């Protein structure tokens, strides 16, 4: 014998199922109508994005492609090429040396004596500066 609690649970579950089915049918039929009548103007753009994404994934997954074009530039997921190491030159604000952009952060760690790889020993350059 089922109690009033079980009847309410079954009724609410049935009601929720019917409501969910109705919502799914409404959304599916509206999407179908939009696609069938050609009302979705972004459809071509989305298809182009999907095509480019699949092409980029295939390029990255290809073992014969090392991810580089002309062994100088790396190709990103959007098909754009970038140098594998930043080639711009910056001047260190501490010591005045010219440093490539790809090595600037590690240089600053050593030059300024801060960062995770800082040595506890006193460096020659700081000793020389103190003796002056």
Image (spheres, rainbow, N blue to C red):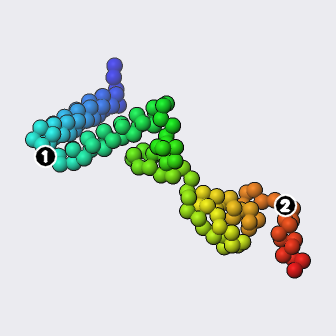
Compare marks 2 and 1 and give the one earlier in the sequence.
1
| Residue 131 horizontal/vertical position (percent) | 90, 77
Work out whether residue 26 can be spotted: no
SS state under label 1: loop
| Residue 55 horizontal/vertical position (percent) | 36, 37
Q: Which residue is drawn at 12% across and 43% down?
A: 38
Q: Which residue is drawn at 49% across and 30% down?
A: 63
Work out whether residue 54 can be spotted: yes
Horizontally, residue 53 falls left or right of residue 112, namely left
| Residue 23 horizontal/vertical position (percent) | 22, 38
Question: Of discs 2 and 1, which sits in the foreground?
Answer: 2
| Residue 22 horizontal/vertical position (percent) | 20, 35
Q: Which residue is drawn at 46% across and 43% down?
A: 69
Can you identify the residue that label 1 sits on? 39
Q: In which quarter of the image is residue 111?
A: bottom right
Give the residue at the far left of this rendering.
37
SS state under label 2: loop
Res 120 label? 2
Q: Distance between the residues labelled 2 and 1?
A: 68 Å
Position of the C terminus, as image quadrant, is bottom right
Check whether the beta carbons of the residues at disc 2 and disc 1 lie within 8 A of each other. no
Give the residue at the far top of this rendering.
1
Q: Is residue 14 above or below residue 114?
A: above
Horizontally, residue 67 falls left or right of residue 49, namely right
- 10 Å crowding of disc 1: few (<14), some (14-19), many (20+): few
Q: Quadrant of residue 119?
A: bottom right
Judging depth in this view, the residue of 76 and 119 nearest the camera is 76
């Amino acid at each position: 014998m089922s109690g009033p609690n079980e009847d309410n649970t079954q009724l609410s579950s049935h009601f929720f199922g019917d409501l969910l089915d109705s919502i799914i049918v409404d959304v599916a039929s509206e999407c179908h109508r939009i696609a069938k009548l050609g009302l979705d103007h972004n459809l071509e753009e989305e298809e182009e994005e999907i095509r480019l994404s699949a092409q980029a994934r295939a390029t990255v997954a290809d073992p014969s492609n090392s991810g580089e074009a002309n062994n100088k530039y790396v190709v990103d997921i959007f098909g754009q090429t970038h140098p594998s190491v930043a080639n711009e030159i910056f001047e260190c604000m501490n010591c005045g040396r010219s440093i490539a952009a790809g090595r600037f952060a590690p240089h600053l760690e050593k030059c300024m004596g801060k960062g995770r790889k800082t040595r506890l020993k006193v460096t020659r350059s700081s000793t020389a500066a103190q003796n002056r």
